[in-house]
Amino acid sequence: MSKRLRKPVKKQADLTDKIVKILAQNANKAFNYKQIGIKLELDDTQSRNQIIKDLKILVAQKKIDEIEPGQYLVVETSKDYYEGQIDMTGRKTAYFVCPEFTEDVFIPTNNLNHALDGDTVKVYVYNRRQGKRAEGEVIEVIERKKTDFVGVIDIQNNFAFVSTANPKMYTDIFISKDKLGDAENGDVVLVHIEDWPTRADSPFGSVIKVLGKPGEHNTEIHAILAEYGLPAEFPLEVEVFAQNIDTSIHESEIAKRRDMRDTLTFTIDPKDAKDFDDALSFKILENGNYEIGIHIADVSHYLQEGTILDNEAYNRATSVYLVDRVVPMLPEVLSNFACSLRPNEEKYTFSAIFELDKKANIKNSWFGRTVINSNQRFAYEEAQHIIETKENTIPIETSITGSAYKVSDEIVFAILKLDELAKIMRENRMNNGAISFDKVEVKFNLSETGNPEGVYFKTSRDSNHLIEEFMLLANKKVSEFIGRQKKTFVYRIHDEPNEDKLLAMQELIKKFGYEVDFNSGSVAQALNNLMKEVNGKKEQNLIDTLAIRSMSKAKYSTDNIGHYGLAFEYYSHFTSPIRRYPDVMVHRLLQFYLDGGKSADIELYESKSIHCSQMEGLATKAERDSIKYMQVKYMQDHKDQEFLGVISGVTEFGIFVEIIENKCEGMVRTREIKDDYYVFDEKQYALVGQSTKNVLQLGDEIYVKVKTADLVKKQLDFYFLRQNNDEIL
C-alpha cells in the first residue's frame, strides 16, 4: 500500500518584521494570530506556530501589546517608526529622508504604499544589519506634498488615464468618465488626486483644467506653471481691487516723508525691464563726501496688510521670470506703473541713505520713507558705455531710445564716481571672504510668436556690479540696523558649504585639469581662484554650476546665521519689493521699529519666511524648466547640424553633453555609441570601450547631432558622431 505523500512545509524564517508591519498598517485594530496568518497568506500548522512564537517575542520586546488574551496591537512609540519625507530619485527608486538617519533609508517601490515624491510619511525601518543599508516601508502617508499634476490624458470608452512627464511620478492617474470635464483625448490637463483606494494600482482624480495640445507654445508654458502650482493670471477680484487703489501722489503724504525730488536720481536696469524698483541718487556734500541714496519702491504704502491683494501677493511670494514672460507678484497697475520708479514721475520710496568718503567708508546712514523724482532711466548697456568711454553721448547702437542722445555732465560724473566706489566696496567684500559667482545666463532672441531665433549669453559687467554693490550695501545695513537691536526680522541667510559636496566637486573638476585644495586656507578664496581660472573657458558654465551646487541654498529666516557667500554677518532683502514678498515684510518691520514698535511675533514671521523660501524654490524650478523647454524648441530647428559639445555628466546609461556654442544640454545614450561596447567606470566618471579601451570622460569634447527633441518631456537626445581629435592633438 503506497503512502500518501505530504506536501513539504517550507520552514518560515523570523516573521517579526512582517508581523509588526501588518499591525502598524492597522494601528487602531487588534489582530489575533489567525488574522495575521491570513494577512501573511500562511495557514499551515508550522507557520501558525511560528507566528504565535514571534508574537510572544514582540510582546517581550515591547514592540506590540497583548491588549487582551490573543489580541495584539502595535506599540506606536516603537523606536522603529520615523516621520520624514519621501525622495523619489527616479520612477522606480525612492528614499526616506529623516534627520534621525545619517544616511537616507532605501524604500523598495512595492513598499511605498501610495506615497509620492515629497510626501510626509511614517515609515517602519527594518532592523539594520552591519554592512547592509537600512530599508523601510511606508506605513502611513501623513501629508501629500502635492495633489495636482500635469499630464497627457488618454481617454478610453468608460474611463481615462493621465500620464505625466515628471520623472519622479511612478504612476498614472485614473479618471472616471464623469470627471473628464472638457478634456479631449491627447490634451495636456491639470488633474487633482482625490483618493487612492487601498487596493487600487493608481490614484483616482478629476480634471481641473485643460491646458491645450502637447507641443504648443502656450500649452507647454502654462503646463510648467501648473506643474509647480504657480498661477498664470490674477483672479478678477484681485485685479479689480488693484485698479481701485488710489495711486496719486498727495501733498499730505509727502509731508510725512523726506523730500528728495530735487536730488539727482536715476535708474539702471535691463533693456526690457518694465518694473523699476530701485534708483540711486548722488550728491556732493560740503565736506567733500558723497551722499548716496538707495531708493526702493514703497510697495507697502499700497499693499495694505489683510487685503485680498496682500493675500494674493503673499501666496505668490515672488514674481516668476520665464523665458518669454513674467508672471508678476503684483498686478500691472502697481508693478509697472504706480510702484515702478519711472523717469520724470514723483514716486513714494523707502530709502537707505549713506554718507561715504572717497574710500567708500560709511560716515553716516539714514533709513526711512522718502519721495523722489527720477531724472533718467538707463539700461545697463548705456551705463556701461559711460563707464568705459567717460563720454556723455549715448550712441544709437547702445541707446534704448533708438537714437543717439546726450546726458548731463552731472550724471556722467555721478555714474563714474559710483562705479569707482562700487569697485572699492567689491574689492573689500572679496577680501573679507565673499565668493564671486558671475555665472553666464542663457538668453534667447524670441520672435513675436515666442519662437527662439537665437541664443546669447548674459554676463555681468561694471554697470551690473555698480548696482549690485549698492543694493548689497542697503540690504546689509538695514538688517544690521535691526539685528543689533535684537528684534524679530526677516533675514536672507546662507549656511556654510557641505564638506562632502566640496570634496565631490574637488574630484570632479580634476577631470577638467583643475586642482583645488579646500583643506588648506579659505574655501571662499579657493573658489574665487577657480572662478578666475575657468573664466572664458569652454567648461566655465559646467564648473560654475558644480561650484554653485556645492553651496548651501540661501533662504529666508528669522534665525540669523549670516550669509556665507557674501561674507556678511547681517543680510536681508530690502531692495526688490515689487517682485519679492520678503522685501515687503522687511519694509513693514523696519518702519514699525522706526516708529518705536516692540519686537514682532517671531513664530509668525518664521512661518512666512518658510513659505517665501518654498515659493522661491518652485519659481526657480519653473524658470529652469522654461529655459530647458526653449532650448529643446531651439534645437528642433537645428536637427541636421553638427555641434561640438563637452561631456558634462556620465552615468551608466549615457553621457550628458553640453553644446559649447549655445549651452543646450542633452544625452547620448550608451547603447547609441556604436563604435564599441561601453561600460560605466564610476571612479573615472567615464564610459570605457571594452574592445578599444577608448575613454569618454567628464570634460571631453565630442561632436553630436540632435536625435530627438521632446518638447513635452523637455528632453534632448543626441547622436554621438565622434570625439574631437583637435583636442587630443
Image (cartoon, rainbow, N blue to C red):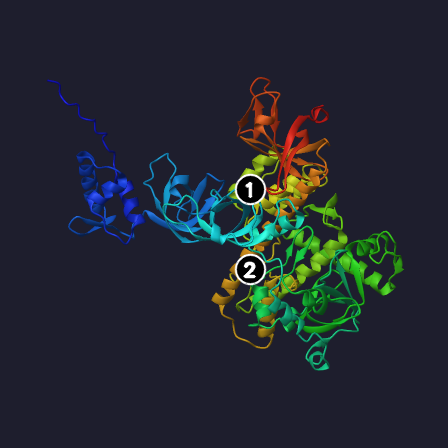
Q: Residue furthest front?
A: 157
Residue 128 horizontal/vertical position (percent): 34, 39
Which residue is disc 2 drawn over? 612
Q: 611 or 551: nearer the eye?
A: 611
Residue 2 horizontal/vertical position (percent): 13, 18
Q: Residue at image x 30%, y 45%?
A: 21
Which numbered dot is residue 156?
none
* Label 2 vs label 1, nearer the camera: 2
Residue 391 horizontal/vertical position (percent): 88, 56
Q: Amino acid at mark 1?
A: Leu
Q: Residue at image x 26%, y 41%?
A: 16
194 vs 332, left or right, is left
Which numbered dot is residue 502?
1
Reply above or below: 304 against 574: below
Residue 616 horizontal/vertical position (percent): 58, 56
Q: 14 or 72: nearer the eye?
A: 72
SS type, badge 2:
helix
Reply above or below: 272 against 452: below
Is residue 526 visible from the viewing direction of this image?
no
Please identify the quadrant where the N terminus is shown. top left
Q: Residue at image x 77%, y 73%?
A: 261
Quarter residue 270 falls in: bottom right
